Amino acid sequence: METDDEKTGQLSDNEYVSDSIHFFMSDSNQAEPDEVICDCSGTTRGKILSLVEQGIIDPDTISRKTGAISGCGSCEWDIENILDEAIAKL
Ligand code: FES
């Protein structure tokens, strides 16, 4: 069943706050390496950045190695954002 927000295409309050936080965190890779990015697999920011340091920058490969993005999928955007920021610094 669709919610009113889904019918109108508007963000819920929680989605709006989450998007705002991401917008203002211009360099989120400076955050804690122990931060869990994927709740389904327990994949941390540090694990993702460690893989990037090994030259693994493909979300599919990161998914296969960590299990991230293979559950609910809600971490995909965050992981792609982390990869974009990390790759920009390579
Ligand atoms: S939070 Fe990453 S797959 Fe669910």
Image (tube, rainbow, N blue to C red):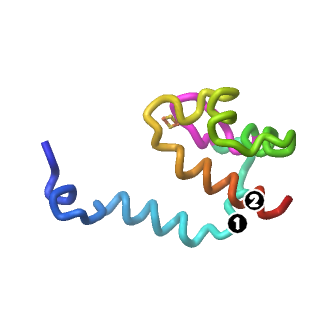
Q: Which residues are magenta?
A: 36-46
Q: Residue at x 69, y 52 (%)?
A: 83
Cα separation, mark 2 vs mark 1, equals: 6 Å
- Secondary structure under tag 1 reads loop
- Asked whether, in this view, residue 47 is left or right of residue 41, the answer is right
Q: Does residue 78 belong to the magenta stretch?
A: no
Q: Residue at x 67, y 53 (%)?
A: 82
- Secondary structure under tag 2 reads helix
Q: Position of residue 22 (x, y in %)?
A: 54, 64
Mark 2 is surrounded, within 10 Å at the Cα level, by few (under 14), some (14 to 19) or many (20 or more) other residues, namely: few
Q: Is residue 7 above or below residue 60?
A: below
Q: Residue at x 69, y 58 (%)?
A: 84
Q: Is residue 31 above or below residue 73?
A: below
Q: Position of residue 71 (x, y in %)?
A: 47, 29
- Asked whether, in this view, residue 31 is left or right of residue 17, the answer is right
Quarter of image, res 86? bottom right
Query: Tag count in the figure?
Result: 2
Q: Is residue 61 above or below residue 87?
A: above
**Which of the image's four quarters has the N terminus?**
top left
Q: Amino acid at mark 1?
A: Asp
**Which of the image's four quarters has the C terminus?**
bottom right
Mark 1 is surrounded, within 10 Å at the Cα level, by few (under 14), some (14 to 19) or many (20 or more) other residues, namely: few
CB-based contact (under 8 Å), mark 2 and mark 1: yes
Q: Residue at x 77, y 57 (%)?
A: 87
Q: Which residue is mark 1?
A: 27
Q: Amino acid at mark 2?
A: Gln
Q: Does residue 42 belong to the magenta stretch?
A: yes
Q: Position of residue 47 (x, y in %)?
A: 75, 37
Q: Which residue is mark 2?
A: 30
